[in-house]
C-alpha cells in the first residue's frame, strides 16, 4: 500500500469511490506488469515474454498511464 500511496494517491485528487477503484485498478496493472522491482533485480512480478534478440536500430516508445503520472517503455513495433 505504501507504493500505491506514494506513487499515486499523493499526486491525484479522487472524486468518487468509482474513480478511486478505476485508478487503483490501473495502478495495480502497471505495478504487476511494467514497474521494475528492486527485490526482483529490476524485473516485474508478471513480466511480458522476454525478447530473444533485441532489434537493431529499433526505437523505444513511452506509454503514459493515468494522465502521464505513470510511464511504461517498450520497443516500437
Image (cartoon, rainbow, N blue to C red):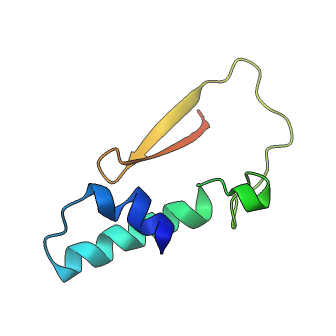
Work out whether 61 lies above or below 49.
above
Q: Position of residue 40 (x, y in %)?
A: 77, 60
Q: In the displayed image of the protein, which residue is found farthest to the right?
A: 52
Where, quadrant-wise, is the C terminus in this rendering? top right
- Exactly how many numbered labels are in the figure? 0
At x 52%, y 32%, the residue is 61
Q: In the displayed image of the protein, which residue is found farthest to the top?
A: 57
Asked if residue 35 lies left or right of residue 71, the reply is right
At x 24%, y 58%, the residue is 12
Q: Position of residue 38 (x, y in %)?
A: 71, 55
At x 26%, y 75%, the residue is 20
Where residue 6 sits, quadrant-wise, is bottom left
At x 67%, y 23%, the residue is 58
Q: Position of residue 73 (x, y in %)?
A: 56, 40
Q: In the displayed image of the protein, which residue is found farthest to the bottom?
A: 17
- Name the residue nearer the viewer: 1 or 34: 1
Work out whether 20 lies above or below 76.
below
Q: In the displayed image of the protein, which residue is found farthest to the left?
A: 15
Asked if residue 3 lies left or right of residue 66, the reply is right
Asked if residue 30 lies left or right of residue 51, the reply is left
Asked if residue 64 lies left or right of residue 2, the reply is left
Q: Position of residue 8 (x, y in %)?
A: 37, 60
Work out whether 74 lies above or below 67.
above
Amino acid at each position: 500500500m505504501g507504493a500505491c500511496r506514494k506513487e499515486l494517491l499523493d499526486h491525484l485528487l479522487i472524486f468518487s469511490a468509482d474513480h478511486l477503484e478505476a485508478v487503483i485498478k490501473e495502478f495495480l496493472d502497471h505495478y504487476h506488469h511494467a514497474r521494475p522491482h528492486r527485490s526482483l533485480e529490476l524485473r516485474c512480478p508478471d513480466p511480458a515474454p522476454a525478447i530473444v534478440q533485441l532489434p537493431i536500430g529499433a526505437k523505444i516508445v513511452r506509454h503514459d498511464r493515468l494522465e502521464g503520472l505513470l510511464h511504461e517503455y517498450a520497443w516500437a513495433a
